[in-house]
Amino acid sequence: MHTYLASVPSLTRGRLFFEPESEIRTCYQRDRDRIIHSSAFRRLKHKTQVFVEYEGDYFRTRLTHSIEVAQVARTISRALCLNDELAEAVALAHDLGHTPFGHTGEDALNHLMNPFGGFDHNAQAIRIVTSLERHYAKFDGLNLTWDCLEGIAKHNGPVSQPYPTSLKEYNLLHDLELQTFASAEAQIAAISDDIAYNNHDLHDGLRAGLFTDEQAAELPIVGTSFACVDLKYREIDPHRRRHEALRIVFGQMVEDVVKTSRGLLANSGANSVQEVRNLNYSVIQFSKEIQEALSKIKGFLFQNMYRADRVMIQREHATQVVKDLFEVFMNSPELLPIEWGQEVADSRQTINLARLVADYIAGMTDRFAQQKHNQFFVKS
């Protein structure tokens, strides 16, 4: 039992802007609810995971991915007697800063923003939840707890210097202790991301016909999972066979994290959440055997899915769309939405205008980015 290492709502470090506590929801529940009700969360429905969202209704989007990550995070947190509300909140928010067109869009925007401090989707998520969501009367952003903001900023571990510009600016106002690890719950959100995308990218790649069941069955974990299904079900149709096998893969990853992390938590010597943060390693990990297996699976997916001809054509197109839109708005900022008028007027320095343009483009969905591109570049 590791309840003494769980984040406790009553011991939260609070919010930047004081708000009275709710009588019916914990502070972490309120964080989760604000994330779900945010505009940025809704836009994830039409943002690419790997396949552009209009290619098919069955492929994952950033929204369905985030929901799957949250489900895994809740499961692992409860198994380890940690706070599943905080883990879920961080998991739901972890991809809010993603651009249209997945990592391709991020790479393109980072390249374009290189002279102005670069672009990082984790830092952009912080910018969204602390500034760009503008719905509340008393503050910009969602006014999430320090604990949740910390998890969003550094769920993947301590942040390397130089810090991304957006993260650096907020950190000066509200120190997130970027040099340490985050809570165990945030670490769970990070590893749940790995579990979810490895599993669903196998599923989506198979569905898209980028590789076959037989090719996937040559991979560690996957092959034994197919064998288990074949042993149990003699005459099962291929679709159900694949689903059953990937269920086993999914379960093995989750169970391995729980078992491995139980040992790491017990042997860490940590007696508080802060001591977990101050360790020089993550207490939420896969076993060495599963890490090696996942490394092979990731290599296979990189070669056969992320660099497949069909996906690479999308990448080239997405890169051009982002580049073209960036240049249009930098050269003609008056084309930005009218509600951004004051920000445009205040952007007297090129670096400020570039950040504003990056905020606008990063917030676009795939379809809206394509529509805007068509508006400017496709002659009727």
Image: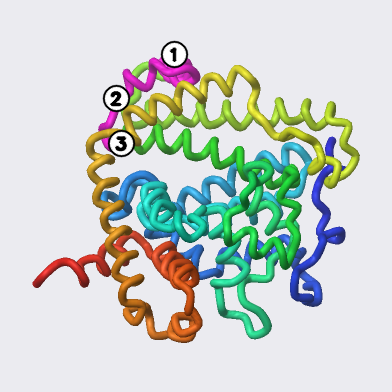
Place of residue 145 in the rendered image (x, y in percent of width and height, measured from the top left): 73, 63
Locate the N terminus and report the quarter of the image it occupies.
top right
Q: Nearer the viewer, mark 2 or mark 1?
A: 2
Find disc 3 in the rendering and name its residue: 207
In this view of the protein, which residue sits in the foreground, 339 or 334?
334
Q: What is the spatial separation of the Cα atoms under label 2 and label 1, in whole angstroms?
A: 20 Å
Say which label, 3 or 1, has the lower sequence index: 3
Q: Which numbered disc flags the more N-terminal residue, 3 or 2?
A: 3
Q: Please say which color scheme the image uses.
A: rainbow
Residue wearing tag 2:
212
Badge 1 amino acid: Leu
What's the residue type where badge 3 is placed?
Arg
Looking at the rendered structure, the secondary structure element under dot 1 is helix
Location of residue 160 (image quadrant)? top right
Q: Which element type, helix, strand or loop, lies under badge 3?
A: helix
Of the 4 image quadrants, the one containing the C terminus is: bottom left
What kind of element bears circle 2? loop
Residue at the (61%, 72%) spot, across then down: 141
Quarter of the figure with residue 219 = top left
Q: Residue at x 49, y 31 (%)?
A: 247
Query: Which kind of residue does numbered mark 2 sit on?
Result: Thr
* Residue beneath the point at 75% across and 70% down: 16
Q: Within the magenta stretch, is there residue 342?
A: no
Q: Residues within 10 Å of mark 2 (few under 14, many from 20)?
A: few
> Looking at the image, is mark 3 or mark 1 nearer the viewer?
3
Q: Which residue is mark 1?
A: 231
Asked if labels 2 and 3 touch by Cβ distance under 8 angstroms, the answer is: no
